[in-house]
Image (cartoon, rainbow, N blue to C red):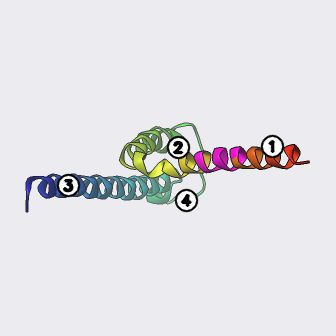
Amino acid sequence: MDYFDKDKYERARKKVEDIKGFYWHATIYFVVNVLLMLGHLGLYDGDFLGRSLNIGFFLTPFFWGIGLLGHGLHVFKNSFTFFKNWEERKLKEFMDQEEEDFKNTTRF
């Protein structure tokens, strides 16, 4: 392997590690928050669904969810090129349409 291939391999390996890290983060988020919600609902003390929900019920999933969203945006930042490509295709489409309309109106 030459230097360029090693560098490309290391970037790809880093990207895979980042994606795996995000999936682990999401899995732990889901498991821990399900357990916390069951605890808030009273599963562990025999009063399941006998409690009213309070703001503490939502705090951990909400703020941890914000962190998970940030982690996902960081990991998948290059995956959001669909919107940019779509915008460029639409611009080209409108420019081509305008050019076609202009050609059609200038004919006699």
Distance between the Cα atoms at labels 1 and 4? 71 Å
Q: Give the label on residue 8, or none.
A: 3
Which region shows up in magenta? 88-95
Query: What residue does disc 2 label?
Result: 57
Q: Give the label on residue 54, or none.
A: none
Q: Which residue sits at x=40%, y=59%?
A: 31
Distance between the Cα atoms at labels 3 and 4? 53 Å
**Marks 1 and 4, the one that precedes in the sequence:** 4
- As helix, strand or loop, the secondary structure at mark 2 comes to helix
In depth, the one of 38 and 107 nearer the eye is 107
Q: Position of residue 97 (x, y in %)?
A: 75, 49
- As helix, strand or loop, the secondary structure at mark 4 comes to loop
Contact (Cβ within 8 Å) of mark 4 with mark 2: no
**Marks 2 and 1, the one that precedes in the sequence:** 2
How crowded pointer 3 is (Cα within 10 Å; few <14, some 14-19, many 20+) is rated as few
- Is residue 52 visible in the rendered structure shown here? no
